Amino acid sequence: MSITPVPKLLAVLAGKAFERPPVWFMRQAGRSLPEYRELRTRAKDFIAFCFNPEMAAEATLQPMRRFPLDAAIVFADILLIPQALGQDVWFEAGEGPMLGDLPDLKAMADQIEASTDRLANIGETLRRVRADLEPERALIGFAGAPGPLRPI
């Protein structure tokens, strides 16, 4: 019987010390890899790219093939969460993310159950990446939380 190795990142979080800390890149897919740039051209827009499990999994795994990183960060965008809750979200070329008016709390609360289905492709991306990622390498995701509703 084989024992599945605990990813270094998870071991460190549990208190184990290593000679070197675990390494990962926050924006590791990024625009610097030519294979990422080529893959990106196949999606109609950035949101469609994030919601395509095959493409998002590939974007997540590309830097893992090039570098000896201890963890992969799932290719997605934090703004998919407000979009799933009914806020308009789009990306303007040369500008970045744009947000429509914030829906009222009741409207967002009414979207919570449906948002699970709207974000299901992200779960599929996670399943694909975990299946292809070596067990000793961690998979990092992220989640959103309420932010300021006014400029700070």
Image (cartoon, rainbow, N blue to C red):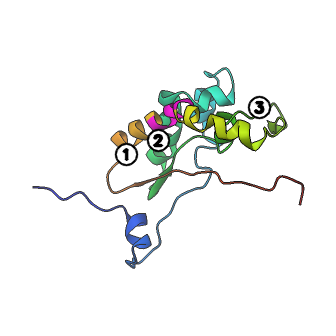
Does label 3 or label 1 sit earlier along the sequence?
Answer: 3
97 to 11, vertically: above or below: above
Q: Amino acid at mark 2?
A: Leu
The residue pinned by badge 1 equals 133
Task: Find residue 145 and report its horizontal and vertical position in percent.
Answer: 66, 54
Give how far apart the Cα atoms at labels 1 and 2 are: 7 Å
**Residue extent of the magenta highlight:** 117-123
Task: Find residue 130 and report its horizontal and vertical position in percent.
Answer: 38, 44
Task: Please state which of residues 111 and 7 is positioned toward the viewer in this rendering.
Answer: 111
Task: Find residue 131 and report its horizontal and vertical position in percent.
Answer: 34, 40
Q: Which marked residue is nearer to the observer: mark 3 or mark 2? A: 3
Does label 1 or label 2 sit earlier along the sequence?
Answer: 2
Identity of the residue furthest to the front in this view? 106
| Mark 3: secondary structure | loop
| Mark 1: secondary structure | loop
Instruction: Indicate left or right for 113 with 139 as reference.
Output: right
Give how far apart the Cα atoms at labels 3 and 1 are: 33 Å
Give how far apart the Cα atoms at labels 3 and 2 are: 29 Å
Determine whether label 1 and label 2 are within 8 Å by CB: yes
| Residue at the spot 46% in from the left edge and 36% down from the top edge | 125
